[in-house]
Amino acid sequence: MELDDVVPAPDHVTARSREIAAPPDVVWEELHKVTLSSLPLSSVLIGVRFLPALVMRQGRDLPLDRTFVDVLPIPLLSSEPPSELVYGGLLQPWRMLGGEQAPRLDAAALSAWTEPGWVKTAMEFRLTPTADGTRLHTETRVAATDATAKLLFSGYWLFVRTGSSAIRREVLALVAARAETRAPSPS
């Protein structure tokens, strides 16, 4: 599955990549082992984002013992070990408590969704073999379903863009460090 299958015409795109001196299967395993508690900066940033819900008792505690790939706010659409994970869903992240409960949609239904008041969001982790190991790439695409949602998300994004990028860098760095520690040394 490709991100073009889910959000082909995004309003916002964020992408990060890292070359890792380890084979894809090792990188895949380490990506799936990263817990929120192993990401100190990310834990703080995610906690700040969900503080209103925690204070108002509208949310659960932060799942620090769960893996990063299991706590993403959008559903997993496709998993092809050890090469890709694709997530996709509807969000209203500008709302203090996260907005309405979104329906769970497959890639085709999400791509076709037009109901106003939402952003369609897709995220992937793609692992590509290289001569020296693996390129781990993450990309997130967001497309608003109407002008109001686009304006609201753009305002929200001004405040969270830097933190979102920091979370991606922290995840990629941790996966790289762990995978390279496990990888066989060159002969």
Image (cartoon, grey):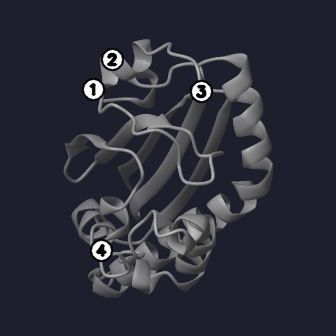
How crowded pointer 1 is (Cα within 10 Å; few <14, some 14-19, many 20+) is rated as some
Q: Quadrant of the N terminus?
A: top left
Are the residues tagged 1 and 2 within 8 Å (C-beta)? yes
Cα distance, mark 1 to mark 2?
A: 5 Å
**Could you tell me residue 154's position as x and y percent?**
76, 38
Q: Disc 3 designates what residue?
A: 143
| Label 3 crowd (10 A; few <14 / some 14-19 / many >=20) | many
- For badge 3, the amino acid type reads Ala
| Circle 4: residue type | Arg
> Would you say 126 lies left or right of 172 here?
left
Spatial CA distance of label 1 from label 4 is 24 Å
Marked residue nearer the N-terminal end (4 or 3): 4
- Foreground residue among 94 and 169: 94
Image position of 124 with respect to 131: above or below: above
Residue 117 lies, with reference to residue 163, above or below; the image says above
Instruction: Give the distance between the C-alpha atoms of the residues marked 3 and 1, in whole angstroms.
Output: 16 Å
Which image quarter: residue 151? top right
Question: What's the residue at 32%, 24% (across, down)?
Answer: 107
Residue 27: horizontal and vertical position, in percent? 31, 67
**Residue at horizontal 26%, vertical 82%?**
184
- Residue 154 seen from this side: yes
Q: Which residue is mark 2?
A: 109
What amino acid is at disc 1?
Asp
The one nearer the camera, 54 or 81, is: 54
- In the rendered view, does 94 fall on the left or right side of 106? right
Among the two numbered marks 3 and 1 on one chain, the one whose residue lies closer to the N terminus: 1
Which one is nearer the viewer's eye here, 141 or 55? 55
Judging from the image, what secondary structure is the residue with disc 3 in? strand
Cα separation, mark 2 vs mark 4, equals 28 Å
How far apart are the alpha carbons under marks 4 and 3?
28 Å
Residue 65, relative to residue 99: is it above or below?
A: below
- Residue located beneath label 4 in the image: 66
